[in-house]
């Protein structure tokens, strides 16, 4: 059976990507071990007759997919535990998934001669000293800091992928994903947009770390999924592409916009900002734009959709 493989299919981006591929008529095999993914996502995806799911930790060899039963045409490799609060509690899992797990995926791609799209992260740039960040920027990272379990895991995975491209001529492309938001995020999410929205719709203080002057960019999940699929279709092997929004906003302005959109009377509350929190994120999108990708959902519309989703699911 010819199929597309999605690792991390129960995650936020992974589940949205899988649903889009299924809607396009693709036969999709999803893998996830639910360490941070949501079983509810898989339950909804199983309504599609062309979806197959295996609960599996990719740190272990993926023997089921090395048989003649399946013929993988492409692999979207999204698997990795996420979340700032998980940097230490799930630090080993982050590092092993990014290293051993990615090695297993690359070996699987060799068996099937499948193209691989790897979702890396803007975290590989560390706390950037230049803005916007181009793909050639090597970053300002702390290899032993608290964030290193995720940052260095992704950096190692990128290095391993590039080795396979050079040594084995594997067809693989890297997407450096910047902040993403939208329907499908868990109410228990600790990322900034869901955390602010949940507090706002409960009319409870909206948390802003520090003075709120730190900036981020936010890409709506539908646009992110379109970008990842575009890279599978047009991304060049051995190339890295930033993928996200290039519209910066301060965390204080984000809180104010969410307060206005939810029409809450809750106040904005300043809380302690972790010392390892980065000051900014701002991708240079010239490379992905040349492939034909563009944002179609701005932050105002995306927040409205996301707020509606959380109102219906909390």
Image: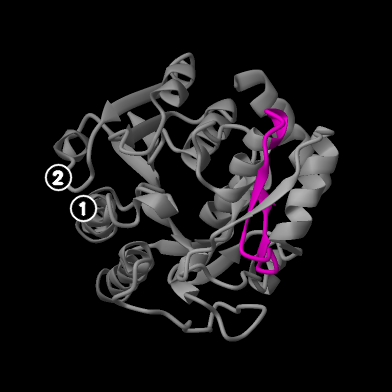
Q: Residue at x 24, y 61 (%)?
A: 99
Residue 230 x/y as whole percent = 60, 53
Q: Which residues are magenta?
A: 200-220
Q: Residue at x 30, y 38 (%)?
A: 35
Identify residue for label 2.
61
**Quadrant of res 95:** bottom left
Residue 298: tell me if it is visible: no
Quadrant assignment for the N terminus: top left
Task: Name the element at disc 1.
Answer: helix
Residues packed near mark 1 inside 10 Å, few (<14), some (14 to 19) or many (20 plus): some
**Percent coordinates x, y for residue 6 in the rendering:** 40, 40
Q: Is residue 97 above or below residue 134?
A: above
Quadrant of the rendered image containing residue 56: top left
Instruction: State the residue in front, 207 or 175.
Output: 207
Question: In the image, is residue 215 part of the stretch drawn in magenta?
Answer: yes
Horizontal and vertical percent for residue 100?
Answer: 19, 57
Q: Quadrant of the C terminus?
A: top right
- The reply to whether the magenta stretch includes residue 170 is no
Q: Is residue 80 left or right of residue 106?
A: right
Query: Looking at the rendering, which quadrant does residue 283 occupy?
Result: bottom right
Q: Label 2, label 1: how many angstroms apart (C-alpha)? A: 6 Å
Check the image and report above or below for 276 versus 259: below
Q: Are marks 2 and 1 in contact (CB under 8 Å)?
A: yes
Tell me: 183 left or right of 103. right
Q: Residue at x 36, y 71 (%)?
A: 155
How crowded pointer 2 is (Cα within 10 Å; few <14, some 14-19, many 20+) is rated as some
- Per the rendering, the mark at residue 215 is none
Q: Of the residues under marks 2 and 1, which one precedes in the sequence? A: 2
Q: List the residue tagged with mark 1.
A: 104
The image shows residue 14, relative to residue 279, as above or below, that is: above
């Amino acid at each position: 059976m010819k199929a597309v493989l999605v690792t991390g299919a129960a995650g936020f981006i992974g589940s949205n990507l899988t649903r889009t591929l299924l809607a396009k008529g693709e036969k999709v095999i999803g893998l996830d071990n639910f360490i941070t993914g949501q079983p509810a996502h898989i339950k909804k995806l199983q309504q599609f007759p062309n979806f197959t799911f295996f609960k599996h930790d990719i740190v272990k060899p993926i023997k089921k997919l090395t048989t003649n039963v399946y013929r993988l045409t492409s692999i979207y490799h999204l698997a990795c535990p996420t979340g700032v609060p998980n940097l230490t509690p799930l630090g080993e899992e982050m590092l092993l998934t990014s290293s051993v797990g990615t090695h297993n995926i690359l070996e699987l791609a060799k068996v099937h001669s499948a193209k691989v799209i790897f979702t890396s992260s803007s975290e590989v740039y560390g706390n950037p000293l230049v803005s916007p960040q181009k793909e050639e920027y090597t970053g300002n990272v702390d290899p032993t800091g608290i964030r290193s379990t995720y940052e260095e895991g992704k950096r190692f995975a990128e290095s391993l992928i590039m080795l396979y491209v050079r040594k084995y001529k594997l067809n693989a492309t890297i997407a450096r994903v910047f902040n993403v938001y939208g329907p499908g995020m868990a109410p228990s999410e600790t990322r900034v947009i869901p955390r602010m929205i949940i507090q706002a719709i409960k009319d409870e203080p909206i948390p802003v770390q520090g003075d709120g002057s730190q900036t981020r960019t936010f890409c709506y999940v539908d646009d992110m999924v379109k970008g990842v699929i575009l890279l599978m279709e047009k991304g060049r092997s051995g190339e890295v592409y930033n993928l996200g929004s290039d519209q910066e906003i301060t965390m204080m302005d984000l809180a104010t916009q969410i307060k206005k959109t939810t029409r809450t009377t809750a106040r904005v509350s300043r809380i302690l900002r972790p010392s390892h929190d980065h000051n900014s994120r701002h991708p240079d999108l010239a490379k992905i734009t040349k492939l034909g990708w563009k944002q179609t959902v701005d932050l105002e519309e995306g927040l409205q959709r996301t707020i509606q989703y959380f109102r219906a699911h909390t």
